[in-house]
Structure formats: structure tokens, C-alpha cells
């Protein structure tokens, strides 16, 4: 095994890398060859502190023994079982454990292989649910500006990132968007939920008035928008969305691909905000990022609406070859056990204050125009270089990697979300190095 660690191919051209500046990367590759707990090992043998839990997914830290062993054992015991019309016990067990963990009422689980697939699945469940109830005129889906719901066609349609949409022609029709809630002029340097902006939820009422509630199937939002730079909902905003959707018979979908599994210091963001949606999409932290897997949690009301007609008939025409894949299910179960044994799903609440204080020490450092945080998530927004958006943050990212810390940048925003096993000393290192880097940036 270890002899693989130092073997780095010298031809990088074949792999067209995802969401990567390919030409820049291939000129100066940043290659990880190993990882343990809070650190990666680079191809040149350096340790890099993981400030982002991979891509927001390695919540229990890297190469955790229980998860590794569960995968090894499952691979040797039952490698694959057909997902359609056949079953295997591990997937059922994982679904039960997820329901135990989920907010009350979300009692059924559909498995997928990624966050993007969870989103497609959730949107299709929402549309089909209304039809199953004889309410097929509800065809519209409402998303939000600056929302990220993965990269498949449904997800980019309800998503609100122009650069992810504009190249791809006609997206889903019947989609509308609410405004985002990010407002630096009113909420800069807020700790936790901002004071201003709950009234933006009333924009949903405007959309309902425009189209009529009888045409709207679902509203999908990230409780905290992650990818577009950690946009934290204003106090009362999500509660208001819940009231409006409930009043109009519209399903509320929380996309918890990032916020699920302890990121905010509660199992789900729904718990943090005390707002229970009709559908929750998850992925990432479900298997600690180790094996691709997603899950969509739905209420009994939704599930039961499908359970009609002749019993030999398939109730929902949807699913993936790898839905509930044995190894992913085993990884999921071992991940949930690790979270439970180590109290990781609530650790963000214990560490949150230290994290918050450390982050907000960046106020006043050059270029920093906002710092915001919730649970174990934080963002530092930088003043863009005039005429060269994203350049300043990207150079912070490269310098951070060279200095031994992994951060994420989106636009001119630095986002951080360490594994939930993070200790105070790691936070000190991460923020200490970041401070030095920001001080040296052009
Ligand atoms: N919904 C949300 C809310 C997400 O954050 C997806 C769906 C799609 O998941 P998949 O597994 O298909 O990638 C995501 C994914 C980043 C970053 O750096 C964020 C994501 C993925 C990769 C990078 O912000 N979010
Ligand atoms: N494309 C082809 C030709 C297929 O046969 C299948 C599945 O059988 C798919 C796509 C979908 O693959 P998956 O179920 O892994 O999403």
C-alpha cells in the first residue's frame, strides 16, 4: 500500500478535472497522497491541515479505522446486490439509523450517490407527490439566487449561480428564484444569524401571487448557503419560509448536503433552526466522504401518497444502479457510529465559540470586508482586486496550501469548515497562518 504513496504520474493530461483551473493546476500540481485525522500528506511529503473537511464532507476526519474496516469487510462479504427489486440488509439498517437521527416526521429514505443526485431525486419526488395526490397542476419549482444544488439539470435550474447555468441552454422551465439574503451593508461582521433580512422571505409571497400557489410544487433552499460563500439566514427567515410554504400547500426542501451531519453543531440544520421541512437532501458527511453516497429524507405523508395502486407495480419510477450500494451503506453505518461514539454531531456547538472568536480576530486585517460564522463554518470575505474578481482569494488559497493549510475559496470569499474533530490548537494554526497570508497579499 505505502509504495503507492510516492508514485505520482507525470502525464496529467487525460484527467479533465472537475471545477478546476486545469491548465494552471497541471503546470503546478497540488497532489495529496495520504491523509490521517486532521491532516493530508502532499506528494512532496508535507503535512497540510484540513481547514475544509475535504469538500465539506470529511466530518469525522480522515482515514478513521471503523469506517475503513467496515468498507473492507463489506467488500469481501457482499460486493454488490442489484438495487432494483432486490435488497441487502445494510441499506435497510442505514435507512433506519438515518430516520432515528433525522428531525421528527422524516421517516423514509431514498438513496443516491451524490448531493447532485439527491437534489434531482428530491425535485422529482416533489413533482410526483403532487400528481400522486391528484394535484398535477403544481409543476413549478422555486429556488434562490446564489443557491447551489449540484450540477445536474434540475439542480442548476433551481440553483442561482449564473456561471454554472449560462453555458447550458434551456434549463427546466417553470422555475423561479427568490432573492438571496446576503447583505454586507447591513450585516457585515455578524456572529451567527444576521439581524436584517427576514422580510426577504416575503418575496416568496410575491412569487406565489404572481404564479398562484396552485401551480407551485416546492421551494428548495440551503438552510445556510455553502458553496456561494457561507450565506447565513437572517433571524426568522427560515421560519417565515416554512409558514408561507405550509399556508400554500407547497413542499419545503432543505438542501442539507453541507449542513447535514453536525456542521452547525446539531445533526441537521433543521434542528439548529427549529424548522422542519418536508424533504431533506444529504450526501457528503453521510459516509464521511469516503464512498460516494447521498440520501433524501421525506415525510410519511409524502411516502404514503405513493403507496397506492396494485402492489406488484413500482410506485416511483426512479432510482440508480448504486442506490444503497453495499459498500456505501457500510461506510454510512460506520460513519454514523463514529459520529455517535465521539459526540461529533454536537461538537460544533462546543467548539463554536472558540471558532467564532478566532475567525473574528481577522476583522481589521487588510482586505477583509466581512467575517461570518455559524457552527463550525466560517467565511472571510475579501475586497476584490479592482477589475480582477476572484484573483485575490485564489492567491490566498495557493499561498495557504504552500504554508500548510487547506482552505476553499469561492469568488473573493474564503470558506472554512474543518472536520468536526478539530481541536483548539488546529484552529489557532489555521487562523494564525491565514492572518499572516492575508497580511502579505497584494
Ligand atoms: N447541494 C448542496 C447544498 C451542495 O453544497 C451539492 C448539492 C452537490 O453535491 P455533489 O455531491 O453532487 O457535489 C452540494 C455540493 C465548495 C463545494 O467548495 C461545495 C459542494 C461541492 C464541491 C465543492 O463549496 N457542494
Ligand atoms: N446510461 C446507460 C446506458 C445505462 O444503462 C444506465 C443504467 O443502467 C445509466 C446510464 C444510468 O446509470 P446509473 O443507474 O448508474 O445512474
Image (tube, rainbow, N blue to C red):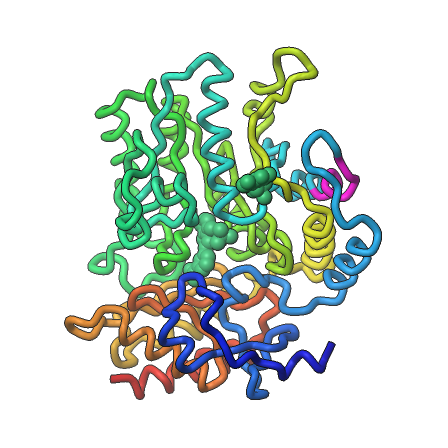
The vertical placement of 65 against 429, above or below, is above
The answer to whether residue 343 is seen in the rendering is: yes
Look at the image and tell me in which quarter the N terminus lies: bottom right
Outermost residue to the right: 77
The vertical placement of 128 against 191, above or below, is above
Q: Is residue 253 left or right of residue 142?
A: right
Residue 394 placed where, x, y %?
Answer: 33, 74
- The residues colored magenta run 87-94
Residue 346 placed where, x, y %?
Answer: 60, 57
158 vs 207, nearest the viewer: 158
125 vs 14, nearest the viewer: 14
The vertical placement of 269 against 209, above or below, is below
The vertical placement of 373 against 394, above or below, is above
Residue 316 placed where, x, y %?
Answer: 57, 25
Say which residue appears at 28% left-offset and 76% top-offset: 392
Say which residue appears at 53% left-offset and 57% top-offset: 263
Residue 8 picture quarter: bottom right
Say which residue appears at 70% left-offset and 48% top-offset: 329
Residue 27 falls within the magenta-colored stretch = no
Say which residue appears at 36% left-offset and 84% top-offset: 437
Amino acid at each position: 500500500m505505502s509504495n503507492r504513496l510516492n508514485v505520482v504520474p507525470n502525464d496529467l493530461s487525460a484527467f479533465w478535472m472537475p471545477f478546476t483551473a486545469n491548465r494552471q493546476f497541471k503546470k503546478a500540481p497540488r497532489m495529496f497522497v495520504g491523509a490521517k485525522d486532521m491532516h493530508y500528506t502532499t506528494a512532496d511529503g508535507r503535512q497540510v491541515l484540513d481547514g475544509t473537511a475535504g469538500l465539506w464532507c470529511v466530518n469525522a476526519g480522515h482515514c478513521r479505522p471503523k469506517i475503513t474496516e467496515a468498507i473492507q469487510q463489506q467488500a469481501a462479504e457482499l460486493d454488490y446486490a442489484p438495487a432494483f427489486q432486490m435488497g441487502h440488509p445494510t441499506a435497510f439498517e442505514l435507512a433506519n439509523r438515518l430516520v432515528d437521527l433525522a428531525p421528527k416526521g422524516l421517516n423514509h429514505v431514498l438513496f443516491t450517490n451524490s448531493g447532485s443526485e439527491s437534489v434531482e431525486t428530491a425535485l422529482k419526488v416533489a413533482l410526483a407527490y403532487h400528481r400522486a395526490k391528484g394535484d398535477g397542476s403544481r409543476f413549478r419549482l422555486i429556488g434562490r439566487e446564489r443557491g447551489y444544488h449540484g450540477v445536474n439539470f434540475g439542480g442548476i435550474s433551481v440553483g442561482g449561480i449564473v456561471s454554472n447555468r449560462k453555458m447550458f441552454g434551456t434549463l427546466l422551465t417553470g422555475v423561479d428564484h427568490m432573492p438571496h439574503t446576503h447583505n454586507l451593508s447591513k450585516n457585515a461582521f455578524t456572529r451567527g444569524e444576521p439581524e436584517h433580512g427576514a422580510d426577504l422571505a416575503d418575496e416568496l409571497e410575491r412569487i406565489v401571487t404572481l404564479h398562484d400557489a396552485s401551480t407551485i410544487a416546492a421551494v428548495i433552499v440551503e438552510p445556510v448557503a455553502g458553496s456561494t460563500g457561507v450565506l447565513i439566514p437572517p433571524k426568522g427567515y427560515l421560519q417565515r419560509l416554512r409558514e408561507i410554504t405550509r399556508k400554500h400547500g407547497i413542499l419545503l426542501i432543505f438542501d442539507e448536503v453541507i449542513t447535514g451531519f453536525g456542521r452547525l453543531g446539531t445533526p441537521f440544520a433543521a434542528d439548529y433552526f427549529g424548522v422542519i421541512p418536508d424533504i431533506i437532501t444529504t450526501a457528503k458527511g453521510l459516509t464521511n466522504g469516503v464512498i460516494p453516497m447521498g440520501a433524501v429524507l421525506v415525510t410519511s405523508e409524502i411516502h404514503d401518497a405513493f403507496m397506492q395502486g396494485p402492489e406488484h407495480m413500482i410506485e416511483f419510477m426512479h432510482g440508480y444502479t448504486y442506490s444503497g450500494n453495499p459498500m456505501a451503506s457500510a461506510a454510512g453505518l460506520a460513519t454514523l457510529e463514529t459520529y455517535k461514539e465521539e459526540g461529533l454531531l454536537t461538537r460544533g456547538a462546543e467548539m463554536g465559540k472558540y471558532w467564532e472568536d478566532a475567525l473574528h480576530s481577522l476583522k481589521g486585517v487588510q482586505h477583509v470586508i466581512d467575517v461570518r460564522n455559524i457552527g463550525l463554518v466560517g467565511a472571510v470575505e475579501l475586497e476584490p482586486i479592482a477589475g480582477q474578481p476572484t484573483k485575490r482569494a485564489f492567491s490566498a488559497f495557493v499561498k495557504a496550501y504552500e504554508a500548510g493549510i487547506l482552505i476553499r475559496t469561492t469568488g473573493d470569499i474564503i470558506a472554512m469548515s474543518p472536520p468536526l474533530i478539530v481541536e483548539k490548537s488546529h484552529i489557532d494554526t489555521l487562523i494564525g497562518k491565514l492572518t499572516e497570508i492575508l497580511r502579505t497579499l497584494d
